[in-house]
Image: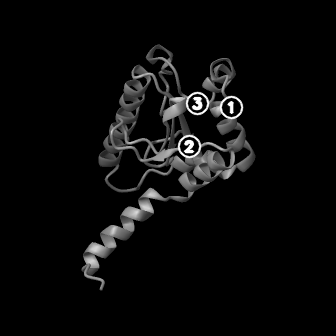
Amino acid sequence: MDRMTPEQRHRCMSHIRSKDTQPEWLVRRSVHAMGFRYRLHVKGLPGKPDLVLPRHRKIIFVHGCFWHAHGCRAAQRPPATHQRFWKEKFAANVRRDRQVLRQLWQAGWQVLVVWECETQEPERLRATLAAFLAPATRPANYELADQHTLYGQAAEFPEDYGR
Ligand SMILES: [Zn+2]
């Protein structure tokens, strides 16, 4: 029955794990509980966004603090070896994230980036998601833009993103 080689199975399993990481699952569960439906990992959009709400024209990314170089404590542990390699790798990730956000904004999407560390505080996570997904999004979101919510026009792009 199972015709996969061990290598294939391993690839398959690690693929699944990378898609259903705990932080993303927490966000999905929260959004779903609020009554919103979404599409997952939409390939046709820049950055293959984690959650897409086409009808609301909204997108949610769940970023791992380490790989996306968040400025929080979880991300402050650079590997001890090959530091230069890692530095360049993280810089490239941040550059790519910025570019993806710009492209999505220019296409008229509102985008929320939820950081992995934020998913560990359920109350705060729910509040952030609720504010972003509320119908009267624009005024409500100005406040959030100061924190971690990135959305709207390319002109609103905070220069310190990813620092
Ligand atoms: Zn973080």
Label 3: how many residues lie within 10 Å, few (<14), some (14-19) or many (20+)? Answer: many
**Residue 10 relative to residue 22: left or right:** left
- Residue placed furthest toward the bottom: 1
Residue mark closest to the camera, 2 vs 1: 1
Position of residue 11 measured from the top left corner of the image (x, y, whole percent): 31, 68
Residue, disc 3 = 149
> Coloring scheme of the render?
one colour
Q: Earlier in the sequence, mark 3 or mark 1?
A: 1
Residue, disc 2 = 115
Residue mark closest to the camera, 3 vs 1: 1
Residue 12 vs 83, above or below: the answer is below
Mark 2 C-beta closer than 8 Å to ligand 1: yes
Residue at x 32% of width, y 44% of height: 89
Three-letter code for the amino acid on which mark 1 is drawn = Ala
Residue at x 42% of width, y 59% of height: 18
Three-letter code for the amino acid on which mark 2 is drawn = Trp
Position of residue 129 measured from the top left corner of the image (x, y, whole percent): 65, 38
View quadrant of ligand 1: top right
Position of residue 68 measured from the top left corner of the image (x, y, whole percent): 44, 43
Position of residue 55 measured from the top left corner of the image (x, y, whole percent): 52, 32
Residue 73 vs 160, above or below: the answer is below
- Please report contact status of discs 3 and 1: CB closer than 8 Å, yes or no: yes
Label 2: how many residues lie within 10 Å, few (<14), some (14-19) or many (20+)? Answer: many
Q: From mark 3 to mark 1, how far is it between C-alphas?
A: 10 Å
Q: From mark 3 to mark 2, how far is it between C-alphas?
A: 10 Å
Numbered disc 2: secondary structure: strand
Residue at x 38% of width, y 66% of height: 14
Numbered disc 1: secondary structure: helix
Task: Depth check: give the residue in front, 138 or 73.
Answer: 138
Q: In the drawing, what numbered circle is on residue 30?
A: none
Residue 67 vs 106, above or below: the answer is below
Q: In the drawing, what numbered circle is on residue 131?
A: 1
